[in-house]
Image (spheres, rainbow, N blue to C red):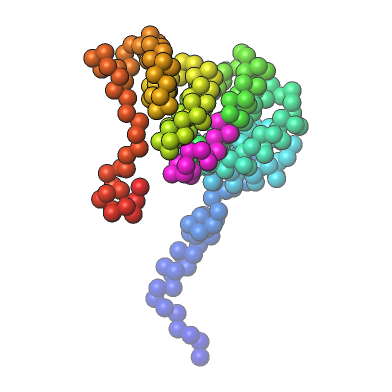
Amino acid sequence: MLARLSVHTPAIVALLSILLLTGCGLFGPQTRITTEADSYARAQDFLEAGNYNLAIEQLEAMENRFPFGAYATQVQLDLIYAHYERRQYDRAMRRANRFIRLQPAHPRVDYVYYMRGLIRFGMAERTASLLSTRNPVDRDVSGYDETFQLLDEFLDRFPNSDYRDDAKGIMQVARTRMAEHSFNVALYYYQVDRPEPALTRLQKLLSEFPGEPVQDNALALKIRTHEKQGDEASARNTEDLLRTEFPDSEFLVSDELVADFRFRRPWYFWLTLGLVG
């Protein structure tokens, strides 16, 4: 005996037909390869929408389907950017280095040199955030120095690039991060009663990072470190320098030095009975 058809069969058939006609878009991949131009336009839509995963899928599909197409070079550049935005920094850096190696004279190679610095800065920021609770002496901030060097190379090669101002801004942030790290290391040494390495760090900070906002902090800490050593003459000389260079410093109140760098537990240490902090 033939099975009896359900009254819902037409509706089910209609639904299946719709899914087939739409390419099973509800469940299948969002990428689509038709013509090269259409594929690239689709990738751009994903990029503009901030959907970097789908943009990468579409661009990589184009890379495989049209390796020598009219958009091939732009696809490579867009993949560097998409991986960077997706925080896939290692992949972005590999693609950037490969582009420079294969197309060193390309008209847009300046963008790739700029992106290398931006990618390295992203790596450095991620590392710094992961290690933010560690002893500052043990933190690796070499990524900021490498960022500075990469962007310095970029500016040297392409002084008139459209990206030069952005590069200078990132270099300044990287420089500030390095100066702040040096101060935090000096502060740590001061708080654990190791004045000699503290002074070494402070002197290096003052000589290598002139103009940084942390300079007045460094001078104030240097005063207290000399005082801890019992070197009043050096302390007063440094205080005179602080008054001359930073007359509006927060550490100078009513003509008195109010710098206190002694270690104090945060409030949540006591609230959690020493479990945190």
Q: Nearer the viewer, residue 162 or 48?
A: 162
Q: Nearer the viewer, residue 151 or 224?
A: 224
Farthest-out residue, top:
244
Kindly identify the residue that appears in the image at 61 percent across and 36 percent down.
80
Is 229 displayed left or right of 76 in the figure?
left
- Image quadrant in which you'd find residue 192: top left
Is 177 displayed left or right of 38 in the figure?
left
Q: Position of residue 133 (x, y in %)?
A: 43, 44
Kindly identify the residue that appears in the image at 39 percent across and 21 percent down.
223
- Image quadrant in which you'd find residue 157: top right
Kindly identify the residue that appears in the image at 48 percent across and 38 percent down.
136
Farthest-out residue, bottom:
1
Q: Position of residue 165 (x, y in %)?
A: 53, 17
Q: Nearer the viewer, residue 97 or 267?
A: 267
Q: Is residue 64 magenta?
A: no
Q: Position of residue 198 (x, y in %)?
A: 48, 29
- Image quadrant in which you'd find residue 145: top right
- Which residue range is magenta in the image? 130-144
Look at the picture and state if 11 lies above or below 234: below
Instruction: Let me know if residue 175 appears in the view.
Output: no
